Image (cartoon, helix red, strand yellow):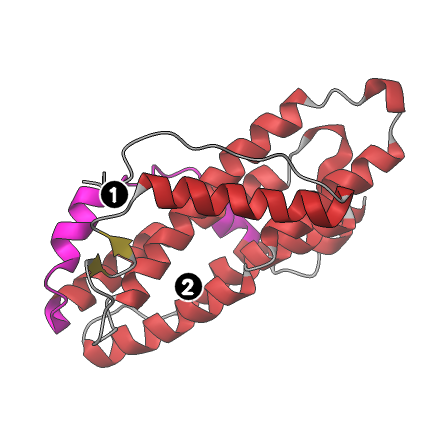
Amino acid sequence: MAAKKALASFPKVLLDEVEKWGGRKQTGVSLRYMTKFGSQPTSRNLVFSAQFLHKELPIRIARRTLELQSLPFGLSQKPAVLKVRDWYLESFHDIRSFPEVKDTNDELGFTNMIKMIKVRHNNVVPMMALGVQQLKNDINPKARKLDEIHQFLDRFYMSRIGIRMLIGQHVALHDHNPQPDCVGCIHTKVSPMDVARNASEDARAICLREYGSAPDVNIYGDQCFTFP
């Protein structure tokens, strides 16, 4: 009931369009292609990139929106999840309302718009976590094996990474002073050791804050190895 009531605040034509775009197939984009394409961020390439995102982002956002509306165990009706769904609907509307990208001026306007969308979605992860917690508080503690929810969250977060990567890469290509060894937001000589070390330090910091102690983490491997 809450979900239907909240949806009533959005025009039916928008919801119908979400259904239509959510049924379309998204286009995969590899890091190799993004790196090669981004190595020459000419005005023409940036316009081409914006034209692609203008068509691709609504598909990906619509698919996630539809999933958010049909989650099991009543998760879709939790206030935090409704908030996330509304963010996706608003972002879908913003992109679909933006005129066709034809030139550099259009591209710059489009880029500013998707930058704002990226900021709008900054708190999706903690908000979804809050929604899951709201669900757990409402159900029988003995029935908290929510495998379907976990599977959804895995898909949802992976898709979110993809959307933010596409937006972030396009925006970063406007940087006239990129960091060394970077093409947009892609580091061409990333160190798995550094990534693992940073992740473990973040995890230890959370443990220390929440529990007062944290285990030591040993990372093994070639410290000089980098991708690709």
Q: Main secondary structure of the magenta part?
A: helix
**Position of residue 140 measured from the top left corner of the image (x, y, whole percent):** 89, 24
- Mark earlier in primary sequence (2, 1): 1
Which residue is located at x 79 percent, y 23 percent? 144
Quadrant of the snapshot with the C terminus: top left
Q: Is residue 129 above or below residue 5?
A: above
Q: Nearer the viewer, mark 2 or mark 1?
A: 1
| Quadrant of the rendered image containing residue 183 | bottom left
Identify the amino acid type marked 1: Val
| Quadrant of the rendered image containing residue 102 | bottom left
Residue 201 visible, this angle: yes
Q: Nearer the viewer, residue 15 or 177?
A: 177
Q: Secondary structure at mark 1?
A: loop
Circle 1 is placed at which residue position? 29
Q: Is residue 78 above or below residue 47?
A: above
Residue 115 in the figure: left or right of residue 14:
left
Quadrant of the snapshot with the N terminus: top right
Circle 2 is placed at which residue position? 95
Identify the amino acid type marked 2: Ile
Q: Secondary structure at mark 2?
A: helix
| Quadrant of the rendered image containing residue 146 | top right
Disc 2: CA contacts within 10 A as few (<14), some (14-19) or many (>=20):
many
Disc 1: CA contacts within 10 A as few (<14), some (14-19) or many (>=20):
few
Q: Magenta region: which residues?
A: 15-44
**Position of residue 64 measured from the top left corner of the image (x, y, whole percent):** 52, 43
Residue 202 in the figure: left or right of residue 193:
right
Please say whether residue 57 is one of the residues in the magenta stretch: no
